[in-house]
Image (cartoon, helix red, strand yellow):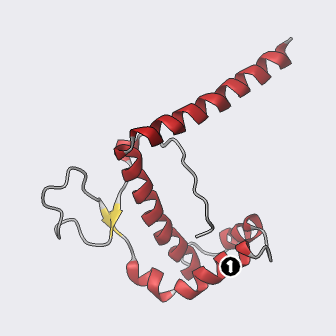
Amino acid sequence: MLGFFFAPRIKGVGKQTLYAFKPRNQGAEGWTICPDKTINEAMILENWDYLLRLVATIKLKENTASDIFRRLNSYSRQHALYQTMKAFGQIIKSLFILCYIDDLALRQAVEKQLNKVELANRFARARGCR
């Protein structure tokens, strides 16, 4: 929604929980990878306007994302916006995992970037030891 995405290396990608809009028993015949749980679609639809308002606030730089999430973390885990963001995040994470599994170039790009970061950290530690 903000025009960018993260491509992390996910530890134990095969053990991650996948989410779908329909229960596992509906339309999953012949799937190699089956979703484990369903997305709370009603929660997303019910609070869609609030989610869009939060995204617009970040996009327009009225507040920083860190301030918004700090405030949201101080709320109860049962707060409607918290639950909506969690459900929406499950969609994004599930799609990313499926793309990650299916796309060799994406996996290689993620590993390449991770190797760069690890080499930079190793170099910084080596310089500090002398």
* Vertical position of residue 91 compared to residue 40: above or below: above
Q: Which residue is mark 1?
A: 56
On the image, the x and y values in percent for residue 39 come to 37, 71
Q: What amino acid type is highlighted by mark number 1?
A: Ala
On the image, the x and y values in percent for residue 123 come to 75, 20
* Vertical position of residue 57 compared to residue 12: above or below: below
Quarter that holds the N terminus: bottom right
On the image, the x and y values in percent for residue 31 come to 19, 55
76 with respect to 123 (left or right): left
Q: Quadrant of residue 67?
A: bottom right
117 with respect to 51 (left or right): right
Residue drawn at (40%, 58%), measured in percent from left and top? 94
* Vertical position of residue 6 compared to residue 122: above or below: below
Most foreground residue, 117 or 41: 117
Q: Residue furthest left?
A: 29
Query: Tag 1's secondary structure?
Result: helix
On the image, the x and y values in percent for residue 129 come to 83, 14
Q: Residue furthest top?
A: 130
* Vertical position of residue 61 compared to residue 124: above or below: below
Residue drawn at (51%, 75%), measured in percent from left and top? 83
Q: Residues within 10 Å of mark 1 (few under 14, many from 20)?
A: some
Residue drawn at (47%, 88%), measured in percent from left and top? 46
Quarter that holds the C terminus: top right
Residue drawn at (16%, 67%), measured in percent from left and top? 25
